[in-house]
Amino acid sequence: MSLILIAALPFLGALLPGLMIRSGRTACAWATASVTLTALIGLLVHAPAVMRGEVIQYQLEWMPLLGLNANFFLDGLGLLFAGLILGIGLLIIIYARFYLSRQDPMGQFYTYLLLFQGAMVGIVLSDNVLMLLIFWELTSLSSFLLIGYWKHLPEGRQGARMALAVTGMGGLALIGGMLILGNIVGSYDLTVILQNKELIQASPLYLPALILILLGCFTKSAQFPFHFWLPHAMAAPTPVSAYLHSATMVKAGLFLMARLWPVLAGTPEWFYIVATTGLITMVLGAVIALFKDDLKALLAFSTVSHLGLITMLLGFGTPFAAVVAVFHIINHATFKAALFMSAGIVDHETHTRDIKRLGGLRHLMPVTFTIVMVAGLSMAGIPLFNGFLSKEMMLDAATEAAWNGNHWLVPALATLGALFSVAYSFRLIVHTFLGPKRDDYPAKPHDPGFGMWAPPALLAVLVVLIGIMPALMVGPLVATASGAVIGGDLPYYSLKIWHGVNAALFMSIAAVVGGLVLLAMHRPLDAAWIRARRPEAKAIFDALMRAVTGAANALTDGLHNGAMTRYAAVFTLAVIAAGSAAWFGGTNPAPAREALAIGPVPLIGWILLMVATVCMVAYHRNRLLSLVLMGIVGLIVSVAFAYMSAPDLALTQISVEVVTIILLLLALNFLPKHSPVESSNARRFRDGTIAVLGGLAVGGLSLAMLLSDFSQESISAFHLANSKPGGGGTNVVNVILVDFRGFDTFGEIIVLGIAALVIFAMTELVLNSPVGAWLKQRPINPLEAGDRHPLMMVVATRVMMPIALMVGVFIFLRGHNEPGGGFIAGLIVAIALVMQYMASGFDWATARQRYPYHMIIALGVFAAAFTGIGSWFADRPFLTSNYGYFQIPPMGEFELATAMAFDVGVFLCVVGAVMLALESLSRFAHRAGDRPSPYPMDIDPSRDLPQEAKDA
């Protein structure tokens, strides 16, 4: 299975839960699990090659000139993280099936989970930093949905907002840092960046890039001082906490630090920033965790502490510490996911997570107690469990670290962090499960069903197996992943239980003994903790957000007061000022050519354009006259395009003008005939002055550009030379639209369709509001013509219809080699249909409409999209066209291009969008009591003659 398919599977599978939930909760869960299992199997297929030291790559060029390519690669580090994401994700899916209640929308939950899973897999498999950044931001957005899944809980909504704000700001910093890194190397491919350590570290931009990248990593991995968001994210359902905060989201920052370790580590800046931040986070998180009474809060701060531990190890910058970091990533994922799921079981069965309301659960929940004891002892670093092994190795690495020449500070603080880790781990076990049974539990505790305890039990088994047989269970994986992190030869290390009598052993003994002493003294220490005055990160964050929001509102209210004239004036003056500074402050070359002599035809056209424009300004309060003058201006511009040998633009302009005028006429039907006077004379004089200055500036700039040569060669030469051989057409404008810049056109037709849908939605909103009721009851103007659908117009439009359709087809078919194309043809056909509506009315025309315009827009978008996707099957970039010549005896030789299918999509989108907008606006014309007329015209002699006349 290709890497791109492994990354895409969760996104594609996110469609399944919403469909399968109709078949039941179990079917929904199994469908979701099958997606993750398929991706995991596809990953494991590559595992043997990766374990042999090979790097699996997949490359898909998309925008190579911008460095944006869909490149993926799988090495040991990617295999480790992708395996954790998919493997633990599979267990979480099973666990969530039995955890979520029937009131929780399970299909929605699994959809969010798969979106997040896909984003995480995309991060760890990306070979292009720009694509990695896209996946990075997707994790923030999808985790926002997961953390705020219980929308009815205020703390859930607040936790989601806090997580999004912190990680989102870090993501912005990361974007800047990664772009700087790519600029230093000259490539945005990670495989290239990882080979240029000397170039990166010698660059003067190394430190700015490092700081920005670390800001992104620290915010994502909840490092001090950004640690506060993770505990507040515990308001999410336990499956979310177990997944996001043990193996996935918070590990994304660790992954990126490990991925970039070969090129960023080894400098004093890296050591002092990363190791110090990790050490502080490790100790601070462990201290706070000891005094938390909520099970998930305790585990959340323990997660913060262990993330700090791994960050500290990566910050040491030594190969041995990097190996230990990789090993502890595996161990932490296993015991912490098991503990989170077990905390969810306790909450699910007892209806509380408050440790002070628990105790004695070992008698009532023996299975859960066993799982928590195994995972908790591992978290405490007790022998025969995997956490002990990596903790011992961590302490050994700490003894080799010196902070500013001090050789005891780092080992002492690392031991202190381990001491508190022992204390909160034993508190979790002792205060929750040991002691006598109570009779005041909120609900009667008991072990859950197999489906709920099996996933954490499997992880607990791995905790024991890795703890007893580390080399056999994870030795090759640790070696392969560590080799990818270090980027060179592995140091000596040994994955075994006994390392002899050394400093790390005595530090570990001190941590265990000290932790047990702290546990024994917990009651008085807890009372002192409660009385102590200390800064609250949440209060600081809330105050900061209020201040920032208040400042933003003040600035926004001062600048954006709703006056469009003010916006236009400020924008125009700013552009004029900036342009004048550039023009008069720089060196302006002499004109490269002289202006052509003005002939009589363009002079007359210019005078007509100026007269129409001045009249437009002078009589703009008369809305109908303004619309007529707008049409005149558009017509003159169309003639100008034709005069300057731009027939495609002329056809497009005149077609757009006709459609626009018709739609505006419909809108004017519901507006007053005259605009009120709202501005004083002084204000109108000011606006007129600004407008004249803006016009003169634009005119002067245009003239200067026409008389000058461009600093670089114009791209038009490329289009002219490659239009026929590359796109198969001699109409360069059409080939640009459907081939060279087809992606732009694809986006434009989507925007056009969205605009039509917005008009439809706003129409629905208005018609269902008091305004809609007023429109239906509005009085009929007696001066209106009684014959709204005159005979002559009906006859004329019927005659025009087939002619217009034939012209539209002709314009469409010739568009690739002569002026025309799908856009112009769509407008012509739309005009022909609009005329039917105008002649015979909305009701008569709608009754004969066979296909909804929404569907026509959708068909157009799908036709254009599938045309672009089809090029992938020929191993070509998206929307790369192809063409060929075919011989049919009666017809002779003719050309067919795949761009024609794309143009069909453009044609359908244009027709659907114009007609949907017309249909939406036409609905405003309905009055209460109006009955649809079955006749195409109001007065029909053959229908309205007396019976005697008909008989005669």
Image (spheres, helix red, strand yellow):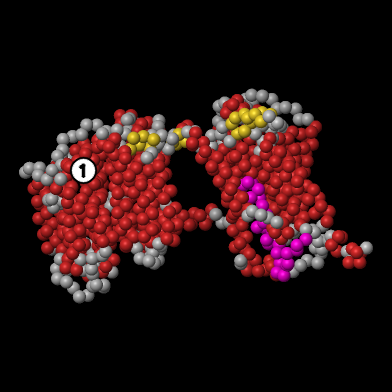
Measured as percent of width and height from the top left, residue 255 is found at 30, 43
**Above or below — where is 896 with respect to 272?**
above
In terms of image quadrants, where is residue 360?
bottom left
How crowded pointer 1 is (Cα within 10 Å; few <14, some 14-19, many 20+) is rated as some
Measured as percent of width and height from the top left, residue 11 is found at 42, 48
Main SS of the magenta part reads helix
Can residue 874 be seen in this snapshot?
A: yes
Toward the viewer: 131 or 862?
A: 862
| Rendered residue at 33%/55% (across/down) | 93
Residue extent of the magenta highlight: 908-935
Q: Residue furthest bottom?
A: 439
- Residue 82 shown left or right of residue 616 in the figure: left
In terms of image quadrants, where is residue 322?
top left
Q: Residue furthest right?
A: 952
For the C terminus, give its image quadrant: bottom right
Give, as a three-letter code, the residue at label 1. Val
| Rendered residue at 81%/50% (across/down) | 796
Measured as percent of width and height from the top left, residue 756 is found at 61, 52
For the N terminus, give its image quadrant: top left
Toward the viewer: 915 or 37?
A: 37
Which residue carries the number 1 mark?
A: 474
**Above or below — where is 951 with respect to 56?**
below
| Rendered residue at 24%/51% (across/down) | 334
Asked whether 613 falls inside the magenta stretch, the response is no
Asked whether 927 falls inside the magenta stretch, the response is yes
